[in-house]
Image: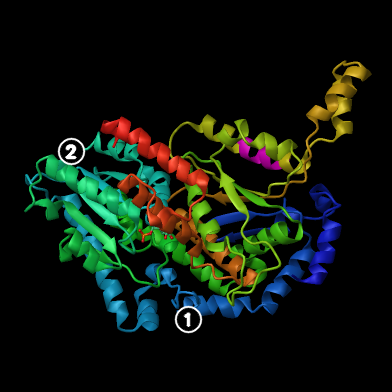
Amino acid sequence: MDSLLQQFAFKAKSRTINDLFIGSNRADKFSLSAAGLYLDFAKQNVSEDELALLIHWAKKLKLEHKIQAMFNGELINNTENRAVLHTLLRAPESRQRAILAEQADDVIATEKRMAVIVDDIHTGKMRGVTNKRFTDVLAIGIGGSFYGCKTALNALHNYCTQGIKVHLLSNIDSDALSEKLAFINAETTLVVVISKTFTTQETLLNANSVKQWLLKKGVNKQALAKHLLAVTSHCDKALKFGVKTKNILPMWDWVGGRFSVWSAVGLPLAIAIGMEHFNHFKQGAWQMDEHFQQADFAENMPVIMALIGIWNRNFLAYPALAVLPYSHALRAFPGYLQQTDMESNGKSVTQQGEKLKSSTAPIVFGQEGTNGQHAFMQLMHQSDDIIPTDFIIALATSNSYQEHQQVLFANCLAQAEALMQGKSLKQVTTELLNKGMTEQDASRLAPHKTMKGNTPSNLLLLQQLAPKSLGALFALYEHKIFVQGVLWQINSFDQWGVELGKQLSGDVLTSLQNKTITSSSSSLSSSTKKLIHQFINFTSVNKNVD
Ligand code: F6P
């Protein structure tokens, strides 16, 4: 990492963020607008000089060239030899044709088919076994085939006006399955299986169980296909599963799972909010894409957020990032970001396979405000760990409870301020003495009430949570994560780290099914073998559980 920046960081660690405000119009200088979003980063522990140096460093690492390489479809996912072109799914048709040539026909045709399917469901042209209209959609998928839809469905709840209830099933735990099936009616339920690979264990087992449920509930074999849709890049596998060709929407290897909500993976969302709003969601993202490609780095929101993130992570050595949307509708956003950020950048070798000397992705966690204030934020205020934070809030509320919005907004600003300002031992002691406490009592209590402060934060302000602003918000974080990957020189678009667990679960499963430790499990630890035996013994005694 850049040695001059390291020297600056050394000094930055011994100053307070408060100091940076003195004599500076920081609120103006350290804020940006793009694609309908406003970013206030004045409460970051970074000076103008340091920011300029970070920008210079990014330029030295040819960030501009790398951004264009992604948008132009170069094979930047080098371990899988793939382009990274999810941005094209929200781009104008002319651009899709310029980059994809003949393949653009397939992409455009898929968008049109998706719109027809959405329309057919809404108008009742598409019907189930008993010729009744579909009232419910059960979408089955996990990871990237789940989080984007889940987050957007929550966020755009007020736009779900189509009268179709959309349910998402991801976890393999049968409790999740039975919870969903308890509230839906087979004859009026359309099932959408979403899996890029169509090999994901959880999704396939859930899909098979739901298929059995449909059959058990009277959807006969001949009519089963009327209830099935699939989104996948392996159409052959979906066909084999029993989905009709006309009901399979393709995706392409240049769309990574965690960046796929813009493709037909977003079908459940489009069904819920309608195609027009779904297109607005994509347009908002494309606005952010254009900003990202065109704005100078000093005014480029994803670049600035990425650089500040690296400053916090690598130069100031802060290990985590808290994401706190002050919005009930955005309550799933921290979970979505955990996947997008940590699955992308949780790496420790460069694109060339060399061991990195610096850390990469922070540990991302969070919850909607104000709930987090009554939980983990105690640690953020008083432990020794400094946790940089992204606050997200909208100015407008979608309902008439204005007082709630005021209180929510006040709490959001107050937390950012409290994290930054803290309260020194001296301040606390004076306060206690002023309240009439004895010196002895005040000095005993004061350390417990001291707040460390100096915790940096961003505040992202939306006018209103709407399809466009949500699209822009998603794209902002996608690009921030990409920029950080470029500067760490890692491949943000593979996820080999998930493979070992998948392989070992297969080994364990074989033993569970054979009711004995099979050769595939022989290299497992004695601890795991003992646990396997406990499961086998338990299930053989409790046959009904088997
Ligand atoms: O968890 C790993 C992962 O491969 C994710 O990257 C992906 O989004 C998810 O599994 C689901 O994969 P698929 O869409 O192929 O079922």
50 sits left or right of 31 in the view:
right
404 sits left or right of 104 in the view:
right
Image x and y of residue 190, in percent: 20, 49
Based on the picture, tell me whether residue 160 belongs to the magenta stretch: no
**Most extreme residue toward the right, as rendered?**
439
Residue in front for this viewpoint, 395 or 387: 387
Q: At label 2, which amino acid type do we have?
A: Asn
Q: Identify the residue at horizontal 74%, vertical 65% (top origin).
A: 51
Image quarter (top left, top right, bottom left or bottom right) of the N terminus: bottom right
- Quick check: 458 above or below 535? below
- Where ligand 1 lies, by quadrant? bottom left
Name the chief secondary structure element in magenta.
helix
506 sits left or right of 326 in the view:
left
Residue in front for this viewpoint, 455 or 224: 224
Label 1 sits on residue: 74
Which residues lie in the magenta part? 410-417
Based on the picture, tell me whether residue 412 belongs to the magenta stretch: yes
Label 2 sits on residue: 185
106 sits left or right of 281 in the view:
left
Image x and y of residue 254, in percent: 40, 72
Image quarter (top left, top right, bottom left or bottom right) of the C terminus: top left
- Quick check: 475 above or below 393? below
Q: Identify the residue at horizontal 51%, vertical 62% (top origin).
A: 478
Q: Earlier in the sequence, mark 1 or mark 2?
A: 1
Q: Identify the residue at horizontal 74%, vertical 36% (top origin).
A: 382
Whether residue 490 can be seen here: yes
Q: Identify the residue at horizontal 88%, vertical 15% (top origin).
A: 436
Q: At label 1, which amino acid type do we have?
A: Glu
Q: CA distance from mark 1 to mark 2?
A: 46 Å
Q: Would you call the spot at circle 2 few (<14 residues within 10 Å), some (14-19), or many (20 or more)?
A: some
Dividing the picture into quadrants, the one containing residue 213 is top left
